[in-house]
Image (tube, coloured by chain):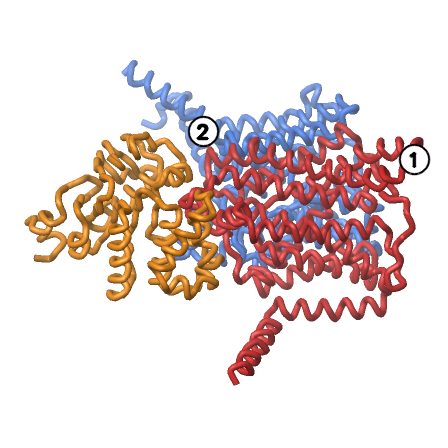
Chain colours: A red, B orange, C blue
Amino acid sequence: MARSSVQSTIVFEVLRRLTTAAGITIILSVVAVIVSAVVAGPFTLVNAIVTGGMWALLAVGLSLVFGVMNIPNFAHGEFFMVGTLVSYLVFTPLHKYLRQNPSSVLSTVAPFAGIFAALLVGALLGVVVEKLIFFQLRRRSREQWVMNSFLLTVGLSVVMINGHQLLWGTNFKGIPRYWDVKPIDLFGVNISMDRAVALGLAVVTIAIFWFFLMRTRTGRAIRAVAQDETGAQMVGIDLNRIQVLTMALSSALAAMAGASLLFMFPSYPTVGLKPLYVAWYVVILVGLGNVAGATIGGFLVALLQTLTSYFIGVGWEDVVPTALIILILLFKPSGLFGSEVKGVWEQ
Amino acid sequence: MLLEVKGLNAGYGFLQVLWDVSLYVAQGEFVALVGPNGAGKTTTLRTIAGLIPPRQGEIFFKGELISKLAAHKISQMGISFVSESLNLFTAMSVHENLLLGAYVVRDRQKQLETLDFVYHLFPRLKERRNQLAGTLSGGERKMLAIGRGMMSNPDLLLVDEPSLGLAPNLTLDVFNALETLRQQGVTILLVEQNVNTTLHITDRAYVLEQGRIALEGKSKELLENKHVKEAFLGM
Amino acid sequence: MQKTETVSARAGRLGNGLLSILNALGITPLGLALIILLAILPFIPPFDREDLLRWLVGAALIAAQAIAFDFTTGYINVVNFGFAAFLGFGAYTSALLAVDFGISPWIGMFVGALASGGLGFFTGVLTLRLRGIFAAVMAWFVGLALLGLARNLVDITRGPMGLSVPTFLETASNRPYFYIILVMLLITYLVLRWITSSHIGLAFKAIGQNIEAARASGVNPTFYRVFNFTVQCAFAGWLGGFYAHYYGILTPQLMHTSHTVEVLAIAYVGGRGSIWGGAFIAFPFIFFIEWLRSSLTSLPGLHLVIYGLLLILVMIFYPGGVAQFYYWIADRVGKARRGSAEQSG
């Protein structure tokens, strides 16, 4: 008797959640996945999932920085750009060396060297940006913080894009692939090693990151700062330390996404713009500061883009999601999953 | 002397709230800071906790100057502040809030001991340990805030208006909890508007009026004071 | 009695009358001097060279945009991050009217202004429920959607290949164009300055500082925000019309976010909430940038690095921009003058 009532409450709860905006979206996208797999072929789907993983990485970083530091980061895509660049600069000479001195072990490891270097440089750059820019403004004035810090990131974005152009020029610095191995065969679909690794990296990173945020002392402190800055100070959390760490993590994730996708996005000054738009679509869609939602949102937007370019045409994959998001915001101004967003303040 | 405040001036922006406030709290004492609305009681606590930089004056804790330290350093030195707005982490569970209260305690064993103590003090919190802090009732939130403040094993607990917005029976619960803490040897500086009860349970008290210390003395003596009777006790 | 008045006194009175008219228009004597200087500049070497005239036109166009940008940013405190797209929308409207229907650019640019204003109205309504940064991002998304449309509707806009547009005049000289844009700049300034110095400007500022407090004191944020957006976008569209019929070629690139950033940087360096700051700084700034670009062709992108750095530095260290600096100087001068007057008196 008691058991069945528990079960019925669970069923009721599931039903209630499925009829919220978020639930409906997820149902619709599952339907879209099935339809697209049937109509457009599984390859499209694989593409959507691989890029989706990376969009999720980007969106999580963007969301984190907004949640913890209240900075709407317009320069987030530029950390993606830095990732592509660093990985290119590290991987290409290694690759050249390997062609003369073949070594199977080294050629398996070399791509990871590139990606790892990107991660490190991304984190370091995040620290520098926080110390040199955000910290300076925070120390002087916290008035209109959200808008002013946003404008700072706009300036930062311009500097980084054109700094790249100044130092490395506008030509495409890309690679055809990281791994020269046969594609993996999965349910009759060929997935290149690069794509498989990119997806694997995204999934593993998000899992680690999730564990870090939810289960560790420092992760908990980060969430505490996002929810109540004063409360965090009161329990002895050093805000500056958390802010530096958050910025470093967020930029490292973005740089890693860039490095992992180097085979799809060759490095050039404005390569970060598209990932930036996408990360913003995701974050606005699920609500600013919502890290968990950002993960799902990454895949949603990737799917939306893939379907758009398949069914409507290449070149429309930014227009349609934009229009859709504008519509969604009209009815749900705090985003699809935005009802419980914390740590977001304005004015 | 555990806490010593000398000639404190503080405020927000152009507005100065505190004028030359001096007070002290000895080890093991239960001291109250009472006064009318807007007298600067909360400002005093916030300044001691390091959330507002003082304009003038010095604050010593365990003989060390703390008035120039950041809030988290002051918390690490052993001062816990239970603010009026509580500043709970509303999207986290009760349990996580308490764990964060012990953020500065590295010793896992000690953390668990204190956690047990807090759950013992507030059994309600134990019942609701997995519930989000934002979904608690007003009284439970107060308990959680006090419990979180206890988690770092502070040498001094600053408590701001624990009875605010609570039903009388819940207020009593909260005051009883403070009594228990004090019997455990915790030093408490309490800010309250409920002057009558406060003066009955505390050792000493300061009366703050318009940002200045107007009166100070043993709580029992203040209860008999003519000015206190007229202004706060309605006699 | 009046007939015995000396000539100089009469001239003085005339001067005072003129001053008070100028004052009502929001032009200081220094401002008037600068406007006159701008008006005669195309005849003073080396500014009579065609390449420098082109810079002057570009600077005046940016100056007018900076005024329109500040009208929203500096007052209701919402950054219209899709600004360039609204400019482009006006530009395309006017251009397509001229190309497809042979409508005169002089009429087309006003139709473009109406079209952009309408779209601004729509965006204003759309962003109403959103605060600060959310509104900025929403305006940005609208801009991105417009940019995407301009890129993809190749049948209409010819997309990235570019649309060639009939120009205002049949002349190859840039000088007449400079006077057109100078007049447009002045009109933009006078109208927006007139609005912001009236009670509407006060309402704008109240909303910009604290929307709840403004609402509580009886200011209707809905009306003023939408009104502000509409006016700004209408001016953007109008200026877009000039862009189309001056350069004679339109690509979707005009609507790109980087263009918004350019205007934004100038408006902020000029000083937000001043209306004139961005316009004032645009001329030396654009000349410096263009000079840098033309003399350091081996370092592409350097000028934009400077844009970005300047924006960051101003935001952190001197948020009031050039306008604040001017007011500070004026204040010092005023004090010194008063001091010396007291001494001599």
The residue under label 2 is which amino acid type? Tyr
- Label 2 marks a residue whose chain is C
What is the x, y in percent for residue A232? 45, 46
Q: Does dot 2 land on a helix, a strand or a loop?
A: helix
The residue under label 1 is which amino acid type? Pro
What is the x, y in percent for residue A10? 57, 76
At x 78%, y 46%, the residue is: A261
Q: Residue furthest front?
A: B109
At x 29%, y 61%, the residue is: B165
What is the x, y in percent for residue A324? 68, 62
Q: Where is C278 relative to B232, above or below?
A: above
**Is residue B174 found left or right of C254 in the rendered image?**
left
Q: Residues within 10 Å of mark 1 (few under 14, many from 20)?
A: few
Q: Where is B107 relative to A41, above or below?
A: above
Quadrant (top left/top right/bottom left/bottom right) for the N terminus of chain C: top left
Q: Residues within 10 Å of mark 2 (few under 14, many from 20)?
A: few
CA distance separating discs 1 and 2: 69 Å
**Is residue A90 found left or right of B79 in the rendered image?**
right
Q: Tell which tag, 1 or 2, sits nearer the viewer.
A: 1
What is the x, y in percent for residue B178? 27, 54
**Is residue C216 found left or right of A277 in the rendered image?**
left
Q: Residue furthest top?
A: C344
Residue behind mark 1: A102
Q: Residue furthest bottom?
A: A1
Residue B199 appearing in the image: yes
Residue behind mark 2: C327
Q: Does dot 1 land on a helix, a strand or a loop?
A: loop
